[in-house]
Amino acid sequence: AYLGQLPAEERSATFSALATLGTPHAPPPEGFFRTIDQTRGLLRFVEERYPGAFHPELRYLTVGSRAQRGALPGGGAGLVGGALAYASYLPLGGEGGVEGDGITPLRCAHLDGAEQREVEAYHIAFVPGSGTRLLGCRWYGSPD
């Protein structure tokens, strides 16, 4: 939201591009999921005021992944990873059994009008809550 609020001349003198890695851009769907919005309305605020690749003078690049399908326990997508992804995807996009990076569903990771890329990576390289590192796990910050 900060970038959108800058005067055009200051914005173009300071920024030439915006790149996001696994960032959710779409607000939760109307109804129940909107009432439990994890961003407390921030995604809706930004989408309403600065939809898509809003500033024509900026280059936009959004990066997302389909490395992890969300699944309820016993659903076959890896017990912990699938369940954590499901729990994250459901309130963001209204569906838990979709593909994403383990935190952000792919459909939420892209902006209309932006250059869109997919990589085979997870949002983070540790187990949320425990801090346990996942050795060999490719994430957005991996050197390869």
Image: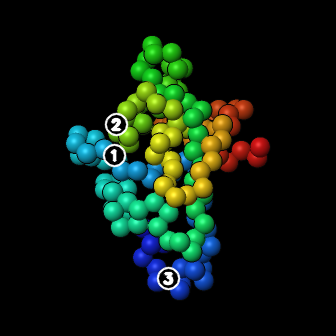
Residue at figure coordinates x 67%, y 48% from the top left: 141
Q: Which residue is mark 2?
A: 94
Q: Does residue 84 appear anywhere in the picture?
A: no
**Does residue 122 sit above or below 25 in this rendering?**
above
Q: Is residue 42 left or right of residue 13?
A: left
Please tell me the numbered disc located at residue 28: 1
Q: Quadrant of the C terminus?
A: top right
**N-term-proximal mark, 2 vs 3:** 3
Residue identifier under label 3 = 8
Q: Is 25 or 125 nearer to us in this picture? A: 25
In this view, the mark in front (1 or 3)? 3
**Residue 83 at x, y percent in the picture:** 45, 25
- Position of residue 65 in the picture relative to residue 27 (left or right): right
Give how far across and how far down residue 52 sits, in percent: 46, 60
- Return the x and y of residue 63 as percentages of the image width and height: 60, 49
Instruction: Calculate the distance from the C-alpha at mark 2 to the C-alpha at mark 3.
Output: 35 Å
Q: Secondary structure at mark 1?
A: loop
| Badge 2 amino acid | Gly
Name of the residue lying farthest toward the bottom:
9
Could you tell me which secondary element the residue under label 3 belongs to?
A: helix
Q: Quadrant of the N terminus?
A: bottom left
**In front here: 34 or 136?**
34
Residue sitting at the far top: 74
Amino acid marked by disc 3: Ala
Q: Amino acid at mark 1?
A: Pro
